[in-house]
């Protein structure tokens, strides 16, 4: 087999682009450092941010900057995850229900479409007012935001099953439950994961946003406090990079889980493992 | 007896197979559900369900009254939100499409750029908005202008990501043999691009817009929370809740929903006009 050239690899161009962005950032930082009185508010050097992450100086409540970020991230992300899982289960269940009953589908389908057009994040303050508890409202909003991409995509998956497959199942005289477990659900799984990939970053965004509405810990709260200079501005930059990282990783995590559970990838994985064993 | 059972069965069968009944029920059933929910809301049964009161969750008629009373103020904020969302969407879509074209022409480096811009889409708006606020401090002396620029930039990034990824698929996932056909015509690269790739990407552009239009409205609303200058639907929702004027906040939520629905309807109309020669 011919060996691929390094410049042909996809990751190589990703790395090039990353280097370009870093270079642009640093040039910007140098310009800002020479023209502004407090450059760290606008565009600090990347190494300064890294230094802030590693430094042992206490910024708030006897905690280092990294500790502040990580401990508040715990509160935020845990609720986001809880809401995400709740929305995922409800979304899948609802799609299944809509597939099972034509009446329910007709009742609910237009509303499922409508909820996509409604800026749910705009509802964050009102949900906070109704539930009265920040942890509860984090979970509720993350659940709503995860619910509809999962529900619509899974339903689309159920609908994408070919007529031939139904016909085959009828010739087998398969029971309804068999049709669901052997044909419909396996077909819908990739669509289900498409929904999850959309939902995961949204759940995180929602959870951080809810934090900013009430001063009760959490990433968003620290973000706004740091912006108001209640603590080192580097906490703000750390949170920006951290939440960007988490947002991007959440999408990759979903792809990874999809590969882990999908039958169509199982074969190739086994082949790989077998080759490794020999 | 046997006759009756047969008749009853055939009645349900008829209902299920009668296209008229089915198409009527597609409209009637959801409308009925909507009326039931509104009635429960108006009758305050919803409040009992959510353990809340008419102060935080005002009844629909109150929201309607406040909506009509504040129509000119709501109109002003709507314009501010829609302008930001629209400009951001247009600029972002153009940028995204441009990147997709570059990626299709120079696949070696373009693909990596697409992965990067896809990653941008997953960055929480909450993190982007304050950064861009900081960066646009020098754009103008006028706070309303510079916060508008910051909001537009955030929307632009989000819209560019959606458009870039979809348009690239449209430019590269061509009908089988169509590229070979162009090759047998000895068509120049430029001609292949104009006659094959560009038209092929149009349906994908609309797929992208279906995601990008609601996303850009949502992004505008969220970045309004962080903007320096107090304007827009999203900011008004928040400000009114801080002031505990929940019914006014609900009137703005209603406006946000209306904007979302209206923009989608417009998009659908444009799509049906633009794609009428496809399939």
Image (spheres, coloured by chain):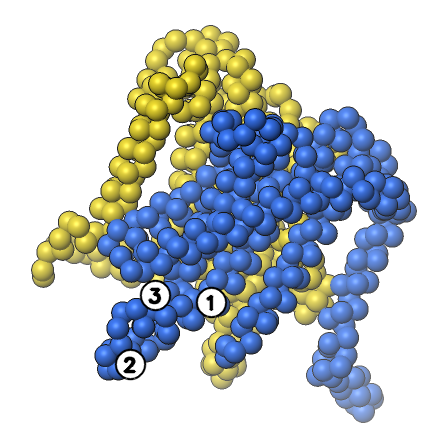
Chain colours: A yellow, B blue
Is residue B252 or residue B50 the one in the foreground?
A: B252
Instruction: Identify the disc placed on residue B202.
Output: 1
For numbered disc 2, what is the local secondary structure?
helix
Is residue A117 or residue B131 the one in the foreground?
A: B131
Q: Tell how many labels.
A: 3
Up the image or down, A222 lies above or below B112; here it is above
Locate residue B10: give its quadrant.
Answer: bottom right
Q: CA distance from mark 3 to mark 1?
A: 12 Å
Q: What subunit carries mark 3?
A: B
Q: Residue at x 68, y 70 (%)?
A: A102
Up the image or down, A111 lies above or below A158; here it is above
Q: What subunit carries mark 2?
A: B
Labelled pair 2, 1 in contact (Cβ < 8 Å): no
Up the image or down, A82 lies above or below B130; here it is below
A137 with respect to A267 (left or right): right
| Neighbour tally class for label 2: few under 14, some 14-19, many 20 plus, Cα within 10 Å | few
For numbered disc 3, what is the local secondary structure?
helix
**Does residue A80 show up?**
no
Q: For mark 3, what is the residue?
A: B172
Q: CA distance from mark 3 to mark 2?
A: 15 Å
B240 with respect to A145 (left or right): right
Q: For mark 2, what is the residue?
A: B181
């Amino acid at each position: 087999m011919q060996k691929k050239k390094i410049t042909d690899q996809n990751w190589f161009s990703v790395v090039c682009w990353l280097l370009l962005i870093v270079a642009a950032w640093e040039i910007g930082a140098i310009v800002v450092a020479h023209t502004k009185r407090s450059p760290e508010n606008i565009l600090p050097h990347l190494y300064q941010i890294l230094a802030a992450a590693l430094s042992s100086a206490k910024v708030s409540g006897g905690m280092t900057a990294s500790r502040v970020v990580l401990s508040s991230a715990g509160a935020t992300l845990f609720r986001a995850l809880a809401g995400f899982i709740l929305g995922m289960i409800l979304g899948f269940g609802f799609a299944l229900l809509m597939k099972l009953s034509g009446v329910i589908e007709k009742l609910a389908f237009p509303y499922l479409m409508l909820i996509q057009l409604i800026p749910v994040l705009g509802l964050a303050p009102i949900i906070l007012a109704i539930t009265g508890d920040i942890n509860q409202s984090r979970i509720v909003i993350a659940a709503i935001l995860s619910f509809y991409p999962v529900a619509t995509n899974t339903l689309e998956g159920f609908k994408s099953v070919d007529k031939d497959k139904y016909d085959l199942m009828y010739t087998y005289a398969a029971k309804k439950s068999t049709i669901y477990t052997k044909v419909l659900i396996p077909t819908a799984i990739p669509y289900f994961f498409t929904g999850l990939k959309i939902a995961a970053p949204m759940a995180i965004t929602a959870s951080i946003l809810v934090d900013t509405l009430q001063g009760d810990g959490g990433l968003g709260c620290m973000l706004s406090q740091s912006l108001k200079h209640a603590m080192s501005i580097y906490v703000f930059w750390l949170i920006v990079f951290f939440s960007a990282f988490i947002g991007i990783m959440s999408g990759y995590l979903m792809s990874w889980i999809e590969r882990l559970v999908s039958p169509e990838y199982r074969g190739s994985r086994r082949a790989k493992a077998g080759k490794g064993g020999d | 007896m046997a006759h009756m059972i047969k008749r009853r069965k055939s009645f349900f069968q008829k209902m299920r197979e009668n296209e008229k009944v089915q198409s009527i029920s597609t409209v009637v059933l959801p409308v009925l559900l909507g009326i039931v929910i509104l009635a429960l809301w108006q009758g305050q049964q919803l409040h009992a369900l959510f353990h809340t009161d008419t102060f935080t969750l005002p009844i629909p008629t109150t929201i309607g009254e406040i909506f009509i009373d504040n129509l000119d103020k709501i109109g002003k904020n709507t314009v501010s939100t829609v302008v930001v969302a629209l400009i951001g969407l247009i600029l972002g879509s153009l940028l995204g499409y441009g990147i997709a074209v570059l990626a299709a022409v120079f696949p070696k480096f373009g693909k990596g750029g697409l992965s990067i811009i896809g990653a941008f889409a997953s960055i929480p708006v909450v993190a982007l908005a304050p950064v861009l606020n900081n960066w646009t401090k020098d754009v103008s002396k006028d706070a309303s202008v510079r916060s508008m620029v910051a909001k537009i930039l955030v929307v632009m990034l989000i819209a560019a990501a959606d458009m870039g990824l979809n348009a690239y698929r449209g430019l590269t996932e061509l009908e089988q043999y169509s590229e070979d056909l162009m090759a047998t015509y000895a068509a120049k690269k430029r001609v292949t691009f104009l006659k094959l790739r560009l038209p092929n990407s149009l349906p994908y552009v609309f797929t992208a817009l279906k995601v990008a239009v609601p996303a850009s409205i949502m992004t505008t609303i969220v970045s309004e929370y962080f903007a320096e200058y107090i304007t827009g639907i999203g900011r008004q929702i928040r400000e009114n809740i801080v002031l505990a004027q929940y019914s006014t906040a609900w009137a703005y939520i209603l406006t946000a929903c209306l904007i979302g629905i209206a923009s989608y309807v417009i998009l659908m109309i444009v799509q049906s006009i633009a794609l009428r020669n496809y399939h």
